[in-house]
Amino acid sequence: MLDSSKVQYPPLQLIQTWVWMMIESGNPELQDKGRNNLISAFGSLAKANEYLSEQVKK
């Protein structure tokens, strides 16, 4: 049985792709899509950044 109390985030590689889209793609449409995907998955860019920082520490 899945533990519904633990939040499930997308795979780290997918999150990294969204960050790349937002920061390095140079394409405004891709930048918006990456930003929107991160906000949809985490609720805010700050929470996405927090999660990525925790993953780097592991």
Image (cartoon, rainbow, N blue to C red):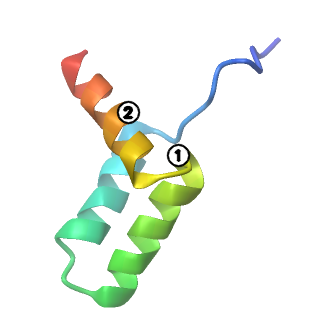
Q: Position of residue 23 (x, y in %)?
A: 21, 68
**Residue name at image x 52 percent, y 42 percent:** 10
Q: Which mark is residue 8?
A: none
Depth check: give the residue in front, 32 or 14.
32
* Label 1, residues with CA under 10 Å away: few <14, some 14-19, many ≥20: some
Using residue 33 as the reference point, say whether residue 30 is left or right of it.
Answer: left
**Residue name at image x 36 percent, y 80 percent:** 30
Kind of residue at badge 2: Tyr
**Residue name at image x 33 percent, y 77 percent:** 31
**Residue name at image x 54 percent, y 36 percent:** 9
> Label 1: which residue?
42
Q: Are marks 2 and 1 in contact (CB under 8 Å)?
A: yes
Q: Earlier in the sequence, mark 2 or mark 1?
A: 1
Per the image, label 1 sits on a secondary structure element best described as helix
Quadrant location, the N terminus = top right
Relative to 54, does residue 52 appear above or below in the rendering? Answer: below
